Image (spheres, helix red, strand yellow):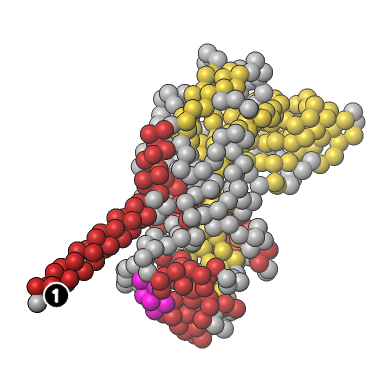
Amino acid sequence: MDLNEDFSALHGNILRDQAAYIAFCVKEVLARYKHPRQLTIIGHSMGGIAARLALTMGIESSIDAVITMSTPHLLAPVTTDLHMANVYKEIAGYSQPLLISICGGSADTQIASDACAIKLDPAKGFAVFTTSMPGVWTGVDHQAMVWCHQVRWRVARALLDMTRGSSPTDKLRYAERWLVPGLGMEESHTIRGVTRNIEANGTTTIILDQEPGDIRCCEGATCERLHHELEVIPSPRDNVPFPLPGEGIKPDEIRYALSATCVGSLRLEVEPDADLGAGDHVYAVVKENKWKTDLRPTRITLLYPHLSASSLKAYIVRVVVETCNAQRPLFRHTSIGHSSVYEHRYFRSDSPKILLHSHTGPAPFISAGDPGLRVDIYQWPECPVVEVKVESDVWRSYSKAITRLRMGIIAWSVGWSAILAQSQLRESQLRDLGGC
């Protein structure tokens, strides 16, 4: 539905007109066809708000899901219009069908992605950043959100699979399969031809260059199928920028990280030429800014509860890796804000410094818990991380504050200017009266 590029971000009544047009279009389409009886709406930018507002105009039973792209759900881009404030109050209190919000992150300079990260009941939808989406793993700016190939491909696959769902729960599960990282998955029953046995004594992570087949945990002669977590993670190439500027991620730049808890032997089926590394999954709560280890696990999870995950805070991370010839470790920052909001950012560990920031922690005018920072390191045991140091980045924190609070700064300046102008006008009027 072409909304004629109206400046809907500036005035709430324009949004209402657009919502009425969307509602009319939905009714007109359904009146012309016997099937289907429900539609899915995809809205870009303020089109997502217009779509949510249209649901209040008698078409809610005709819509099975709303997918929004770079839409500021929590806070309007311009907060000087009372009508806009009323629109946001109206859609916030309205029960809606499935809602999926896709956010561009820091690359989106037109809206603050803090407002895109809407927190929902996990049974009603989710928000995901493009830096988290498997096969995308990079920020996307406001306009590129509608034409970035990696994003379009993932959304199209999700939409095709969602048509197979007979209930909102099924549709949500299909959408999560293509858009959300790190979901628990049941093992595949595909036979890969070769069985590998890996000794395990608790939580184990295996990094592979291909998706594994049947997975079992064996103790002696007894084996049972195993519930596990299978993640698709990027695999940056040496001496090549990650992600490749202007190109994003290539199909051969992925690996699989399999995490499972087993005591005994992990048995999995893979292709004969599979390249894999296996080791423990180590958790650590870090109470200081520096963490050292002499262990060689495959995955390390570090929690920094004393460091704020606020969107106004920025950090510099320096990673020290043991000298080696194997593939360098992969560093991932996870923002922990809500169970239905997914924000991850991946970095090469050989970067001189890694810059961390969040969009799902506490943000200006948006309340949330602040559980601290979390980072994960995926590595080959032959090339381990030996030290991680986190430092506050004062100047970037100031710049983030200016970026996030720019509308407040503008409104404050305009407000004081109006007060001064009114004061001068009143004094001028008093002088004129005195002269008479």
Mark 1 surroundings within 10 Å by alpha-carbon count, few (fewer than 14), some (14 through 19), many (20 or more): few
Q: Main secondary structure of the magenta part?
A: helix
**Quadrant including the N terminus:** bottom left
Residue 95 at what x, y percent from top left?
A: 61, 71
Answer whether residue 131 is visible to the viewer in this image: no
Residue under the image location 37 percent in, 62 percent down:
78
Amino acid of disc 1: Leu
Answer whether residue 428 is visible to the viewer in this image: yes
Residue under the image location 54 percent in, 57 percent down:
118
Q: Which of 194 and 377 lies nearest the eye of the viewer?
A: 377
Q: Give the extent of the magenta segment.
A: 11-17
Decide: is 434 above or below 245.
below
Q: Label 1 belongs to which residue?
A: 433
**Quadrant including the C terminus:** bottom left
Q: Residue furthest right?
A: 221
Quadrant in the rendering for residue 330: top right
Residue 433 at what x, y percent from top left?
A: 14, 75
**Viewed as shown, does residue 287 lie left or right of 314?**
right
**Residue 12 in magenta?**
yes
| SS at mark 1 in the image | helix
Residue under the image location 37 percent in, 47 percent down:
403
